[in-house]
Image (cartoon, rainbow, N blue to C red):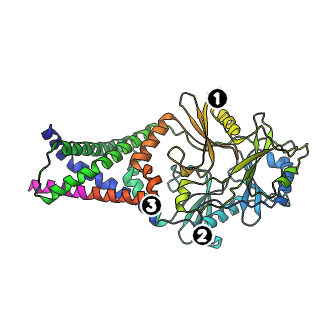
Amino acid sequence: MKRLINTWHKKLGWWGLAALSIWVLSGLTHPIMSWFGPQTAAFFAPKLVIDHTQVAGFNALLRQAEVHKNAQVIKLVANAEYGALLQVTRSGQTERDYYHLQTQQKLNGFDQKQAKWLASYYSGAAQTDIVSVRLINEFNTDYPSVNRLLPVYQVDFSSGTRAYVFTETNSLASITNDFKENLKAIFIQLHTFQWLHKFEFGRLLIVSLFMLSLLAMSLTGLGLVIVLKQRKIKQASRRYHRYLAYLLWLPLLGWSASGFYHLLYSSQSQEVSGLRLQETAQIDTTQGLNNGWIARYQDYNLSSVSVVKDRQNQAVLRISIAPKTDVNANRESRFKGMPSESKAIYINPYTGKERDDLNDKQQAELLAERFSGSDTSAIEDIQLVTHYGPDYDFRNKRLPVWNVKVNNDNASWLFVDPVTGVLVDQSRNQDRLERLSFSLLHKWNHLTPFIGRMWRDSTIVLTLLLLILIAGLGAKMMLTKRK
């Protein structure tokens, strides 16, 4: 057995060295992009500051039939110039409409202005430095499908910084520059062999063979660690190669196994995630709207006001109360996530009174039923999600949301946002298994709660450098034996 393991470990040596060199060097670009790429000046969406005198204008706008035409999302959003604006997302229209709360007039072509302000807000650069703005409706090479949000605006600055902003939630989808894009190109071409994308079967075959060679190298290396007796090794390269093998066989096995799983799953599985909107409820413009609720909440900081619909498809106002205290926002909390509200209140727009029979949990259940086509009996569990994790990650740029678990053939989990009645993300059993594997074995996210992202990335980089070292020692041993 010892001889067999040793023979195969040596036979796979050069293949393993080639695969390890390609993936370790390309893998190093990922933390480098994170560390040295463009950093954001702001970590969270701008706060919505609502002058309570403006809310009367909100009610006045809701009486206009034009506002409701093909509307999917109707809500107030933050704006630097006006404080708050009514934003309407319509089906069949990629650019969102905006209305001035005091004049009740439509602001034509304002979505692009909103995008410019957001890009400046997140990048820290002046709007006068913007050289171009482009609406992106489909994923492309520069803005790939690893991102979740569409449509977005691509805003280019004279410095080379490029921001992608999503105006529905005032979110930054991505920020990059030429340095980061060059590293990303290296990562994509070498780590995933994207240069073979026109020959998908060939790409899968070559990458699979390399992955399997690394799997075999790690397993035969583990076998040698187990079967070889402890002894004093005179040759330094052999001695250090063995010492490092004790430390590195498990990370190499985890990376290669999860990478192989991810490769096969990504190529064979059909994506089910992605934003889905529904038609919002129509306000009955023939009825009067009661402004009585405005005075009751004038001492509260409101983070959003939106129009949603209940189980009877009747229009309801959802008022979001902002957190009472500011939490220290930093880069780490951006990836962990922070809820944008502390409480939600539902208001009957015609009476101005609270709907005590409605809450977010009930709305989440209703949304899950509508998006999944299931009935109430199929809902197994409903949980509030206040932080990002393996099942719901920071690329969605939206918190809090509700995770509704549905008892169907796919054991679906639906992540819904009651603020706007949106299906933010969804996953099946097989999706969650692969995500968990990739999160734990490939990205080492289990370390983040204990040591933070910075030290997690540093640990990964150190491990990758040690893998280069052990590979170099192995190559030296093979060359020495040839002589």
Q: Nearer the viewer, residue 344 or 476?
A: 344
Residue name at image x 39 percent, y 60 percent: 458
Name the quarter where the C terminus is drawn: bottom left
Disc 1 and disc 2: Cα gap in Å? 46 Å
Q: Residue 340's x, y, as percent?
A: 66, 54
Q: Classify mark 2: helix, strand or loop.
A: loop
Q: Residue 466's x, y, as percent?
A: 28, 58
Earlier in the chain: of badge 3 and badge 2, it is: 2
Residue name at image x 55 percent, y 58 percent: 333
Give the labeled residue for mark 2.
124
What secondary structure characterizes most of the magenta part?
helix
Mark carried by residue 374: 1
Badge 3: how crowded within 10 Å, few (<14), some, or many (20+)?
few
Contact, CB < 8 Å: mark 3 with mark 2? no
Residue 120 falls within the magenta-colored stretch: no
Give the labeled residue for mark 3.
454
Disc 3 and disc 1: Cα gap in Å? 42 Å
Q: Quadrant of residue 265?
A: top left
Residue name at image x 62 percent, y 69 percent: 130
Disc 3 and disc 2: Cα gap in Å? 23 Å
Earlier in the chain: of badge 1 and badge 2, it is: 2
Q: Is residue 237 left or right of residue 214?
A: left
Name the quarter where the N terminus is drawn: top left
Q: Classify mark 1: helix, strand or loop.
A: loop
Magenta region, residue range? 469-483
Q: Is residue 278 visible?
A: yes
Q: Residue 63's x, y, as percent?
A: 87, 48
Q: Is residue 28 visible?
A: no
Question: Most extreme residue toward the left, as rendered?
Answer: 483
Q: Tag 3: residue type?
A: Met
Q: Count every numbered label the image shows and give the total.
A: 3
